[in-house]
Amino acid sequence: QVQLVESGGGSVQAGGSLRLTCAVSASGFTGSRMCMGWFRQAPGKGREGVALIASDGSTRYAESVKGRFTISTDNAKNTLYLQMASPKPEDTATYYCAARGACLVEDGFAALRASLYWGQGTQVTVSS
């Protein structure tokens, strides 16, 4: 059983910064081996992968956020972060964290999208 709780969303001006946090509570999983990531969903659009961190610590980013966003965890993977630098209005969305058992970065967002474990989401609004 995994529980995920996001926080840190809010309103920010374009070019500013924001850090999202996902508190992870997992039983029956080896935390350090978990695969975790961030997705987002804008109104009227599907849920898209933003960033993931695989079991070995490798990371993968959507092209639209590469170079601006950074995903990280604490050592035990009890907390997942998404540092958003230079956000743009098109980054406005509800952001969700997701987690599952072991994965490889080559598995991509599809593997994480199939996860049973999702947070409730946190809204991010970027104004121009």
Image (spheres, helix red, strand yellow):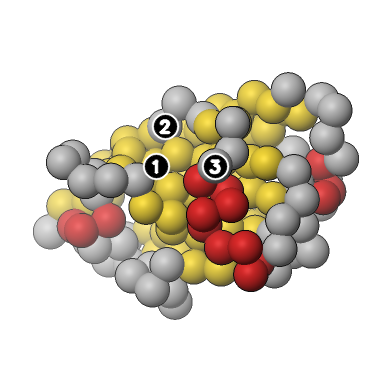
Q: In this view, does 121 lie to the left or right of 16?
A: right
Residue drawn at 42 percent across, 67 percent down: 62
Q: Residues within 10 Å of mark 3 (few under 14, many from 20)?
A: few
* Disc 3: which residue: 114
Between residue 46 and residue 24, name the one nearer to us.
46
Do we see residue 81 in this rendering? no
Residue drawn at 69 percent across, 50 percent down: 35
Do we see residue 91 in this rendering? yes
Q: Do the residues labelled 1 and 2 touch (CB within 8 Å)?
A: yes
Instruction: Tell which tag, 3 or 2, sits nearer the viewer.
Output: 3
First reached walking from the N terminus: tag 1 or tag 2: 1
Q: In this view, does 96 lie above or below 127?
A: above
Between residue 14 and residue 93, name the one nearer to us.
93
* Disc 1: which residue: 95
- The quarter of the picture where the N terminus appears is top right
**Where does residue 37 sit, x and y in percent of width and height?**
57, 50
Q: Is residue 64 above or below residue 100?
A: below
**Where does residue 40 sit, x and y in percent of width and height?**
37, 46
